[in-house]
Image (cartoon, rainbow, N blue to C red):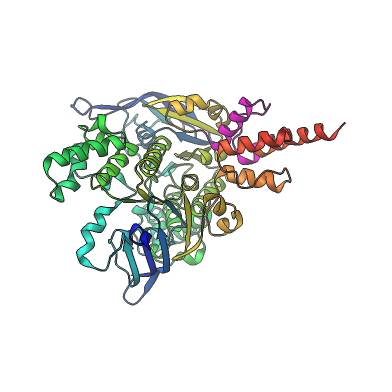
């Protein structure tokens, strides 16, 4: 179920004094099973863009196609779309409202008119997918930790069994352990075949997890490539108000100092391999007469 | 002890929250902290470890269940000190949108001193000075909702500065900001500390921000369980990870290189430090 955006422009308050262009001529295509990172400074249009993907916002001009179908073409209900494209908002736990974790995750599937048996099966599957132990299901959401609560909110979307999962800063405000928990389960869902679109300010996270990055700036897509390609242009990255991961900065400095190392590393492990190779050779050279 | 009045200090501080009818949760289980004048203290710890509760005690937003809190010699239990304490130890919170009250930047910054009854001419100079210190003077007539997250947080900091505090307590001020906004706020905080000698208590989940501090304090389950310079603290990679914390990426890298026997100091934490260390090793000197 590929997603295609064609020449999408979105203008808030069009025609009024406070008119502002949030997206301007954005085109992109996301294939089945991809893990795409969407990055860009605050106000670059990320949230506006993702709200178009499941029809929460209507383009001022341009088209959004899901599975080859223009989502606004015939008018009518967008219910089919909301089931296929699940959107997890920032600080999603603020939307958890039921008395028990089970009830909260069941809310969406129950609205689909599924049988209680099917609802329960979906709740269990969704809880497992985000790593919530079954014994938490009868607890009140308010007894949970921040990381657990965030995962309850994600499970509420996952229980609709979307084919595409869009997450807006799913790890914001969590401690490192909570962040790892949330992100490793997102990774699992991707590996099970789901298309994942991750909006994040954390460059280390997107470098490590995503297969492809889209960089938004001032309502336009200014870069599209693998994390390796995108972050190797450190000047460009800081120009748009982002920051390449520390390991990239380190490798660039080493290169300036004459080390023949790659600068397109995306993880601590890759940087380690590069440096270890060079140090090993230097050691070897000194050891031999 | 001359230093006595120049510090913020908690003694055996205990705080319990009520959760339900009978049940109480201990958020702070006997915390002793001393912050010296002019110090930059970073506090890290997992969610629910008590960091924010501690910060609220320093600003008299909470009172101890037992133990005492002294802010520049004033006990927070004594009601008469409440405004003096809040003026001398100002607080900046996570969400900039919840802290800005006025419709123009400079009016927002003037809000605090106006409430203190500071004369208008003096307010003017305090507002300009404060906005200048955070690099927001050129945008003083802007409407706050048109600012970026980093700019809003700097306005919030200016609002605290206009009260002429000796200390600023920041509770995850960058959690909602993009990388540039984080950098702006961090640079501002550092400058206030280094140039103007303002004491900083900085709570964060970003380990790389804690690197700028003079001292890092680690909290878990309502207790201070570790403290020292960033180097001393981030050496304890296993311990931090078992708490659900992390070490900054370059700390991880230098640890890996040290572990593999390359003779790298395991506590190199910044790009510059690690580059120097590696070049020294490579040239074999």
Residue A58 picture location, percent across and down? 31, 32
Left or right: A163 with respect to B175?
Answer: right
Q: Would you place residue A18 above or below residue A197 in this image?
A: above
In the rendering, at what x and y percent does residue B95 appear? 32, 47
Stretch in magenta: A244-271
Front-most of residues A8 and A174: A174
Residue A270 included in the magenta stretch of the image: yes
Q: Residue furthest right?
A: A289
Q: Give residue B120's quadrant in the image.
A: top left
Q: Residue at x 34, y 69 (%)?
A: B68
What percent of the width, then of the height, locates residue A83?
41, 44
**Left or right relative to B284: residue A136:** left
Please, is residue A236 above or below residue A210 in the view? above
**Where's the C terminus of chain A, which quadrant?**
top right
Count of picture labels: 0
Q: Is residue B18 visible?
A: no
Residue B62 visible somewhere in the drawing: yes
Who is closer to the viewer here, A225 or B129?
A: B129
| Nearer-the-camera pick, B161 or B98 | B161
Residue A75 in the image: state x and y as whole percent: 31, 33
Kindly indicate the quadrant of the structure image that contains residue B134. top left
Q: Is residue A217 magenta?
A: no
Looking at the image, the residue that sits furthest to the front is B2
Residue at the (21%, 40%) spot, across then down: B126
């Amino acid at each position: 179920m590929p997603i295609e955006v064609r020449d999408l422009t979105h203008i808030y308050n069009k025609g009024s004094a406070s008119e502002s262009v949030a997206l301007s001529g954005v085109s992109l295509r996301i294939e089945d099973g991809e893990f795409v990172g969407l990055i860009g400074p605050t106000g670059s249009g990320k949230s506006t863009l993702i709200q178009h993907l499941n029809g929460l916002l209507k383009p001022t001009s341009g088209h959004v196609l899901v599975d080859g179908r223009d989502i606004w073409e015939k008018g009518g209900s967008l219910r089919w779309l909301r089931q296929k494209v699940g959107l997890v908002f920032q600080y999603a736990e603020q939307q958890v409202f039921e008395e028990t974790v089970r009830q909260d995750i069941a809310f969406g599937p129950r609205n689909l008119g599924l049988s209680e048996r099917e609802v329960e099966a979906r709740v269990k599957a969704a809880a497992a997918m985000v790593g919530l132990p079954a014994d938490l299901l009868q607890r009140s959401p308010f007894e949970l930790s921040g990381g657990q609560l965030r995962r309850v909110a994600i499970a509420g979307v996952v229980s609709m069994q979307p084919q595409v999962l869009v997450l807006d800063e799913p790890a914001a405000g969590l401690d490192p352990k909570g962040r790892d928990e949330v992100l490793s389960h997102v990774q699992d869902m991707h590996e099970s075949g789901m298309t994942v679109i991750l909006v994040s300010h954390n460059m280390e996270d997107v470098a490590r997890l995503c297969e492809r990055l889209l960089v938004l700036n001032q309502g336009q897509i200014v870069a599209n490539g693998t994390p390796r390609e995108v972050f190797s242009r450190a000047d460009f990255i800081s120009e748009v108000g982002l920051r390449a991961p520390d390991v990239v900065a380190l490798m660039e400095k080493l290169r300036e100092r004459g080390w023949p190392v790659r600068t397109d590393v995306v993880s601590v492990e890759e940087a380690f391999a590069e440096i270890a190779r060079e140090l090993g050779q230097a050691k070897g050279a000194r050891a031999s007469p | 002890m001359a230093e006595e009045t120049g510090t913020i200090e908690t003694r055996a501080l205990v705080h319990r929250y009520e959760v339900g009818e009978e049940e109480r949760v201990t958020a702070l289980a006997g915390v002793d902290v001393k912050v010296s004048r002019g110090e930059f203290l970073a506090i890290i710890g997992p969610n629910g470890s008590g960091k924010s509760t501690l910060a609220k005690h320093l600003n008299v937003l909470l009172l101890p269940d037992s133990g005492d809190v002294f802010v520049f010699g004033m006990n927070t239990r004594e009601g008469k000190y409440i405004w003096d304490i809040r003026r001398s130890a100002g607080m900046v919170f996570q969400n900039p949108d919840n802290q800005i009250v006025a419709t123009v930047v400079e009016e927002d910054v003037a809000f605090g001193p106006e409430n203190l009854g500071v004369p208008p001419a003096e307010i003017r100079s305090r507002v300009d000075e404060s906005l200048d210190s955070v690099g927001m003077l050129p945008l003083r007539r802007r409407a706050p909702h048109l600012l970026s997250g980093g700019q809003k947080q700097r306005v919030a900091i200016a609002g605290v500065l206009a009260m002429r505090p000796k200390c600023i307590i920041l509770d995850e001020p960058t959690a909602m900001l993009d990388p540039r906004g984080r950098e702006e706020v961090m640079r501002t905080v550092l400058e206030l500390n280094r140039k103007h000698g303002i004491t900083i208590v900085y709570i964060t989940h970003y380990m790389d921000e804690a690197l700028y501090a003079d001292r890092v304090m680690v909290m878990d389950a309502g207790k201070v369980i570790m403290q020292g310079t960033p180097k001393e603290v981030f050496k304890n990679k296993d311990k931090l990870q078992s708490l659900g914390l992390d070490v900054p990426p370059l700390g991880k890298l230098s640890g890996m290189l040290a572990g593999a026997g390359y003779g790298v100091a395991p506590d190199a934490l910044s790009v510059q430090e690690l580059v120097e260390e590696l070049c020294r090793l490579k040239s074999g000197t």
